Image (cartoon, helix red, strand yellow):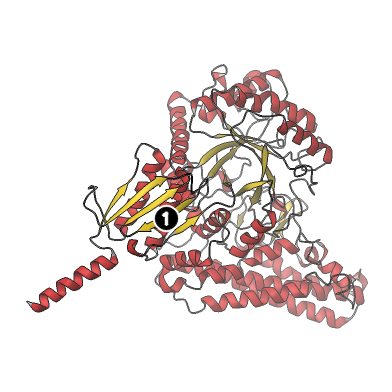
Amino acid sequence: MKNALLGFYFYLVCGLVSGYSQSVYILVDNTLPEFGYAKKVLSESLLKNGYTISNSRTTYDFLLNLDINSVKSGKDSYRIIPDKNIITINGGDTQGLLYGCLSIKEKLNNGTQLGELSFDQESPVMEFRGIKHNLPWDAYRANPALTQHYEAAKKLDYWEAFLDMMVENRFNVLSLWNLHPFTYMIQPKNFPEASPFTDSEFKEWQALYRGIFSMAKERGIETYLVNWSIFVSEEFAKIHNVASDNFYPNFYVNGDTTELVKRYTRESVTQVLEEYPDLSGFAISHGEGMGGMTPKQRQEWMNETMIEGMRLANRKVKFIHRVPFSANLGSGGSTSRDTELLTREAMESIDYFDGPIWVEMKFNWSHAHSTPDLVKVHGGKLGDTYFFPEPKNYKITWMARNEDFFTLRWGVPDFIRSHISKNNHSYVGGYFVGSEGYIPVKDYFTASNKPVNWTYAFQRQWLFYKLWGRLLYNPSTPDKIFQDEFVSKYGPSGINLLEAYSLASSTQLRLASVFDSTWDLTLYGEGFLSLDKGSMKYISVDRLINQKTMDPTYISVKDYVASGPSAGTGYLMKISPLDLADRLERDCRRALALVVDIDTSKDASLLYEVSDVQAWSNLGLHLAEKLRGAVELESFRTSGEASFQVKAVNHLEKALAYWDQVIEITRPIYKDMPLTPYLHNNNALFHWEYLRSSVAEDISIAKNQSEGALN
């Protein structure tokens, strides 16, 4: 009997400590959809961690008081205030309240008990924390890498999972990008002939968009449509004999400025906004589909169509103004002070949108994962016209494009912190992150038939989204938060993975910093590919030698060798190719050491996490040896000294050996993949294995170099 009582008391104490059998009452105003979602998030987490949900206001072990207090907290901010068994979650608004609930969920999932909670508070550093999500219908480019997502992206289950990820990581803006969204969303009242769908087909599309916008609103996420101009439906173009090329799959085409196209566009914008009240707003794009038009003509067309259509809607809307891509008649990209002045004047003349105008600028064109210093935007170097004097009705939102890693997981928290620190000026409102050549829906990468802990492509890249989202919200978020997520997924085996990724996937940042790039296809980092004479090719040793750097603190191979014996003169504060090679080798060897003892035999998901660290590390070691080989080869070419050639061959042979390691790691686990960078060959598939002969060609280049071919 005594033993039985002791057992009972032991069970009771352990149960109370662990949370089991403790009841929780959630006090919340259920009239707002965001409150309902917050309660759902908390309830699911509590049940998962062994608590029960009480329906009684008088009988509970803990009371969670969910409330709005805008006196103590600002927009998107929250405070967690424990007082014995009553825990108050105060939000400065409904979104802040939701983030507070998500914070408690995270603490519970990482082992903290309700009774152990202490005071906590957070406020956002960046107001605008957006994701660029391209759509596979009427996609910007016609390519299997994009169209393969068509059916999966039509399912609301996908969007629910994606929006859950967004709010958990504190993203608050979803932007949906395609050439021409209108006929998927409306049957134009005055142009029903523009619709390609039957009534039943259209109702499916309508339900999809309404479902996306409704779920986003429930999570406090704003939604925007981002289309390119000038584009129409193919049916509209052919029936009316206008805009003859301005429909999918074309994109670099001249603008059609006929009055009929203007009216169709303007009325479509207004009708979409009125039929989708949960849609937050629109963006405008002065680029593709406007060839042959001057910057002034492009702005005037926008004023008459997109902007006027928004103004005529029966409600206030939010507005994203993308900075013009071209200062001339083309669509390829250029900048000028006159265009900047024209655009700024146009934006400052508008006063009827809800909140500031968000001005989107591509940070370092299409390759933000390079240097955190602003070197260029789409079109080239940007002046200070948009920034000084400080704007009053608009805020800059940097577009951090990723066109460099679609397969391998990536995560360097200190790079993101540095990016925010260097670029969070008073005129900056936030960031977008996302891709043009990658849609994160279908997992078309995974070759293993063993169970894994993801369904969709974005879930594979969970670290990328968590780092960008949480650090945009609060750059002081400690690394432990991200490390704990690895441990939550993989137990003790996950402890070193954050550090390993920080070291190994810095390879991408260093490659994109030492090898200059502009638009999408000028670099595909994880594949060491770049556009060369109209097609994507492996970056040869000759191209590495001759390419200028993106980051002005780096020295190109050619400039380094040309500086002669006094290589440091004039470059004392810069990073030479040999310095970079040493840093790559140090960090990548450290990353490999961190994962060498992890047993992945019983967990396929862990196998992929570890393998990606190994792949990045070997790519980094490959780049290190390639840089050394490039320096030696260029030294041989300029001096004729044979010892340089011998060393060049040696380094390039080592580079090939590391590439072979990448193939050995990735061949069993990754499929052959369609790749948007293979724009000019839709049937081409990517895998590192297929580039081996090009990698080996570097050795032949060095071996066959003769004195007669010296520079």
Closer to the camera, 391 or 595? 391
Side of 702 where 674 appears, left or right: left
Identify the residue position indicated by label 1 in the image: 80
Q: Is residue 412 visible to us here?
A: no
Position of the C terminus by quadrant: bottom right
Q: Position of residue 158 (x, y in %)?
A: 44, 46
Indicate the quadrant where residue 48 lies: bottom left
Q: Give the amino acid at mark 1.
A: Ile
Q: Nearer the viewer, residue 37 or 255?
A: 37
User: Where residue 135 sits: x, y (%)?
Assistant: 55, 41
Q: How many marks?
A: 1
How far across and how far down the image is residue 275, in percent?
49, 25
Q: Farthest residue in the left direction?
A: 1
Which residue is pictured at 81% across the width and 61% down the height? 548
Badge 1 density bin: few <14, some 14–19, many ≥20, Cα 10 Å? many
Task: Where is residue 319? Give x, y as percent.
Answer: 62, 34
Dividing the picture into quarters, in which one does residue 405 lie?
bottom right
Pick the quarter of the image with the N terminus: bottom left
Asked which quadrant contains residue 190, the reply is top right
* Residue drawn at x 61%, y 64% as measured from the top left: 414
Tag 1 secondary structure:
strand
Foreground pick, 415 / 636: 415
Residue located at (70% from left, 33% from top) = 289
The residue sitting at the top extreme is: 190
77 versus 155 height, above or below? below
53 sits to left or right of 515:
left
User: Is residue 598 in view from this perspective?
Assistant: yes
486 shown above or below 444: below
